[in-house]
Amino acid sequence: MIPLKYQVVGEEDYAFGISIDADGGYVIDSGTYTSEPPRKGVLTREQQQELLEAIRALGLPEEHPMPQGGTAFMANLTLGAEAEEITYPFWEGALEADEALNRLVRLLELI
């Protein structure tokens, strides 16, 4: 599995993050001002395969800065092992226009 991290930070202390390691182990932090404890587990082979296919389809993501006056949450997608990782910041409104990025994010949200 390609290690990855996906983080969204929003209004009113909203934060959502998923970290997946090379072995398919994951930690999900989801919470607001009434934070919930992190959820941990291991991806199935099918989940790992779907995510790998989505990452390959994404290729090198395009930059998606928030347009002036935009109100969506900002997100960061980090791909690769530590010291080789690449981080792509984007605003969530970009998911409507970037089908490959949308597919990857939706798969992560299903975990």
Image (cartoon, rainbow, N blue to C red):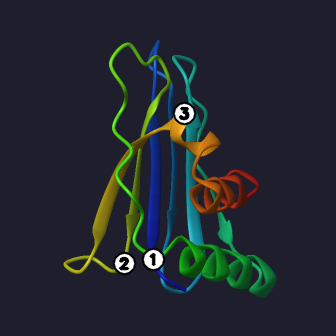
Q: Which numbered disc flags the more N-terminal residue, 2 or 3?
A: 2
**Quarter that holds the N terminus:** bottom right
Q: CA distance from mark 3 to mark 1?
A: 24 Å
Question: Which residue appears at 59% of the width and 44% of the height?
Answer: 95
Q: Give the quadrant of residue 105.
A: bottom right
Q: Give the quadrant of residue 34.
A: top right
**Quarter that holds the C terminus:** bottom right
Q: Which mark is residue 80?
A: 2
- Mark 1 belongs to which amino acid? Pro
Q: Residues within 10 Å of mark 2 (few under 14, many from 20)?
A: some
Question: Which residue appears at 71% of the width and 85% of the height?
Answer: 49
Side of 23 where 11 appears, left or right? left
SS label for mark 3: helix
Side of 82 where 35 appears, left or right? right
Residue bearing mark 3: 93
Whether 65 is drawn above or below 53: the answer is: above
Residue bearing mark 1: 3
Question: Which residue appears at 34% of the width and 56% of the height?
Answer: 88
Q: Which numbered disc flags the more N-terminal residue, 2 or 1?
A: 1
- Mark 3 belongs to which amino acid? Gly
**Residue 11 % position (x, y):** 46, 16
